[in-house]
Amino acid sequence: MSLTTNRQPPGAGRPQTLAEKILSRKAGRPVFPGELVVVEVDHAMTIDSIVPTVIARLEYLGKDPFDPRRVSLVFDHVAPPANVNVANAQKQGREWARRTGVNFFEVGRGVCHQVLVEEGIAKPGMLIVGSDSHSTTYGALAAFGTGMGATDIALAIATGKTWLKVPESVKVVMRGRPRPGVFAKDAALEMVGRLGADGATYMAVEIHLEDGAEEAFGLSERMTLANLTMEAGAKAGLVVPSGEILERYPVPEWLYPDPNARYAKTLEIDLTELTPRLSVPFYVDNVHPAAAFAGTEVDFVFIGTCTNGRIEDLRAAAEVLKGKRIADGVRMLVVPASSEVLKQAMEEGVLQTLIEAGATIGTPGCGPCMGRHMGVAADGERVVSTANRNFRGRMGSASAEVYLASPRTAALAALTGRIPGEEENP
Amino acid sequence: MTARVWKFDDDINTDDILPGKYAPFMVGEDRFHTFAFAHLRPEFAREVKPGDLLVFGKNAGLGSSREYAPEALKKLGIRATIAKSYARIFFRNLVNLGIVPFVSEEVVDALADGDEVLLDLEAGRLYRGNEVFTLTPPPAFLLEALKAGSMLEYVKRHGRFPAE
């Protein structure tokens, strides 16, 4: 790879993975797996549900943000507020943002990760910490994004730094172009299923797209892949820059893994052979061919979230539902990942198609993903969702079942009231 | 004083520990901890006593980064956990809150739900009747933070992270 030759690499001659490259740049010296580093963070992100605790920790430390330009607050987890407690928490966050001057994104702007990408805050090569586990999403553009709890985020906001153990990496190679009807979500679920829910714990997942996959999977699809690495326990999920990423971003020439970098393990996924996947309750890594559950009756279909609430996802659902009506007795909720996605879906007629098919549109944000509002599931109900978790009780009732799938599979389930079989969803 | 062992399976996620709908900003700071394990073991929050010991299988605390899951445990008086392994964010959150996260396959396998034990946190020793189990302390960097009370306390006191 010409980009990695003729220069002094961050590894000082020793081959490095993408995660090791980024953390070496941040540490100002070559670092390798197992080393503990205290490094500057490029951006710290927090959200409505966590910001009251972040503020409390900052008050306890007696600190204001180290650099407010490197901090964002996004209201997405219960937006608009579902009760007075949440409204008060958001009011407190809003006032803190105004006083400190951090970047602030109101109710309706969208899901935190989508917003930070759309706003151009997340950039290739950055280290971004967020008080949401799916902060791995920034890996779509080769930023080291990692989720942390409220105290870690408060410490990062106060000091501009965080501590990390340099992770080993798992190499995931996805080859070829998926067949029509097969999407990045299917590839991501296949990856989680094969790695297992702790298959990448403490590790970075480094995704290599090859033999056509680099063109088939643009920014949106890479966000889906990087997002789901979290469900294998990953500290970060980095997609090697190629395709659309090179068109959209200036990618530093050091931001590539070295050819002989060391990986803890390697997983190969042939996208040309892949069929629609389904993650079956109550574990995300319980992944099967969707057709294996063909005919299973469905009460509620949810399309949205940081995993699959982008324009490409809404288009895939609209394509299935164009000129048709969803099945009697099925509810369908579409929550665009951001106000930009909502606007674009309106301009393209995607919203009209979905509404005419019988879908309800929600305020951009996380929606009912974590079972708090805007359409929680009742006892014993079965949900097909495009989100990233299907844990017991995740979307409301402890006896509700959540099946995770691509937007196309979810839209087909809404259309017929059943999980689609191989003929409809090959 | 003896403590009761509350033993849980592998892959207990933070939605199990505190379902999202019972987050403090949903139900209030004063009562969110009363919903700990609400779906999985509804009796837990009522019956747990300060100093009781939580024991998990592998990949403890996977899922959401919600610090209020371990914070609910802290409010209920939990000071230590033992697991075969932890998901990374949950592990960090425990240290940040000052709950000591021990790792031991052997001790987890040896303990049963409802066991009465005595935990010497400082010495890393666990007693059950005449049996003694040794627990390896967390790595030095984290131990320094835990000795200060938590990572938050350490940074408040020193204005920097350990090893910085």
Image: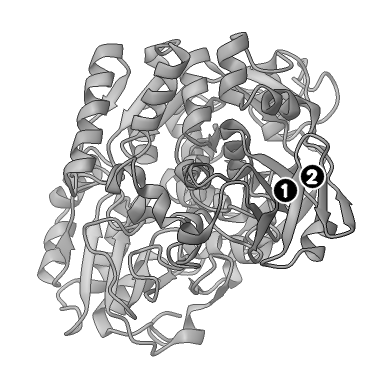
Please report contact status of discs 2 and 1: CB closer than 8 Å, yes or no.
yes
Question: Callout 2, which amino acid?
Answer: Tyr
Residue where numbered disc 1 is placed: A170
Label 1, secondary structure: give it: strand
Residue where numbered disc 2 is placed: A263
In this view, the residue farthest toward the front is B1
Q: Residue at 43% of width from left, 87% of height from top?
A: A294
Is residue B128 shown to the viewer in this render?
A: yes
Q: Position of residue B67 (x, y in %)?
A: 49, 41
Q: Quadrant of residue A49?
A: top left
In the image, B150 versus A83, the foreground residue is: B150
Image height of A205 relative to B138, above or below: below
In this view, the residue farthest toward the bottom is A295
**Residue B123 shown left or right of residue A81 in the figure:** right
Question: Callout 1, which amino acid?
Answer: Val
Query: The disc numbered 1 marks a residue on which chain?
Result: A
Q: Residue at 57% of width from left, 26% of height from top?
A: A125
> Where does the C terminus of chain B fall, quadrant-wise?
top right
Image height of A311 relative to A110, above or below: below
**Residue B96 shown left or right of residue B1 in the figure:** left
**Residue A175 shown left or right of residue B65 in the figure:** right
What is the spatial separation of the Cα atoms under label 2 and label 1, in whole angstroms? 6 Å
On whether disc 2 and disc 1 are found on a single subunit, the reply is: yes
